[in-house]
Image (cartoon, rainbow, N blue to C red):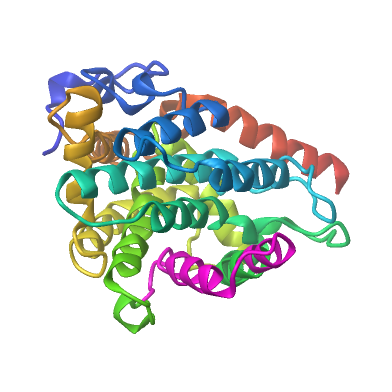
Amino acid sequence: MLPRSDMWKDSKMSEEHTPAADGMQIPKLVDMENPHAVLDEVRTIVCRTFPKFDFEPVERVFTEVVGLFRGECHGYGKCNTQYHDLKHTTDVLLAMARLIHGAILQGETLSPKNIALGLISALFHDTGYIQRWDDHSGTGAKYTLVHIRRSVEFMERYFTQNGSSRTDFRHCANMLHCTGFSAKINEIRFENGAFEQLGKMLGTADLLGQMADRAYLERLLFLYYEFKEGQVGEYTSEFDLLRRTLGFCDTVKKRLGGELGGVNRYMISHFSNRWNIDRDLYEEAIEKNRDYLRYLLLNHKKEYRDYLKRGGVVEKLTAIRDAKTLLA
């Protein structure tokens, strides 16, 4: 539904987008800017269902991936993609845990071992954006079109070095491939229905995690430059990407209900059980972002940056571009 004209002021919006300021929001439940707060919530969620759940393998991978993104992993540089960053990874991890929890509440059968592999796959899903030490050209965004293959390769090295089984690796690789936006889920050779369901959950968590982000619209400006470097699509400008995002939202909705099996339906059970909130906060956040984007495209085509105030994204983007100009 389009926002009413009287909901909007002609003056510049404050940092809080007015439509999203009402009611309960995802960041009010967990500090999404703190990776360890997210990990603690994931632990709480899985232990509600399995009190004796062995969380150590997940926590070990979490430590590895956080170190990788922060430039603390031998042989790799720090993450330099501003959209596909550590926060996006932890956002997806939490969305995955919530879907798993909701699925179990709705009667799905998932073993603790399989759940652990699903969470581990979420952590590894965008490691392919990280450059090695000897890679000095551009940023990790140049790997956008091959980042899934590179993520699987990084995960394979980790599994091999830590003595994990090849079978577990194959399960995780299959799930990770489900994050490809054009992936054909029915063509992936899952060992059983549980792993197929977890793969659909991961593909769903990847979409929900980014699109429900309170700064999603702002972060799209970063995504434009990642796409430009990675030669993805034919976007002509930041605004062109914003404009086309409305159509992308429609495509995502169809994919969630089609190829990904509608597993986003599990979210409401999670929020009801964990927080006593009988609503899907991800769906609400995405719709609020979409409503604000409609308003922006309709009323502020030229000065759209002035109306994207969250997270200091515009300022950060300007600083990065100014630094590149000075170094050129």
The answer to whether residue 184 is seen in the rendering is: yes
The residue lying at 57 percent from left, 42 percent from top is 56
Within the magenta stretch, is there residue 196? no
The answer to whether residue 304 is seen in the rendering is: no
Q: Which residue ends up furthest to the front in the rendered image?
A: 52
Residue 223: give x, y in percent of width and height: 52, 50
Q: Is residue 303 above or below residue 180?
A: above
Q: What segment carries the magenta color?
A: 155-183
Residue 76: give x, y in percent of width and height: 80, 54
Image check: 164 left or right of 216? right
- Which one is in front, 109 or 262? 109
Please identify the quarter of the rendering in which residue 146 is found.
Answer: bottom right
The residue lying at 27 percent from left, 53 percent from top is 249
Q: Main secondary structure of the magenta part?
A: helix
The residue lying at 25 percent from left, 28 percent from top is 274
Image check: 28 left or right of 230? left
The N terminus, quarter of image: top left
Please identify the quarter of the rendering in which residue 46 is found.
Answer: top left
Within the magenta stretch, is there residue 165? yes
Residue 83: give x, y in percent of width and height: 55, 46
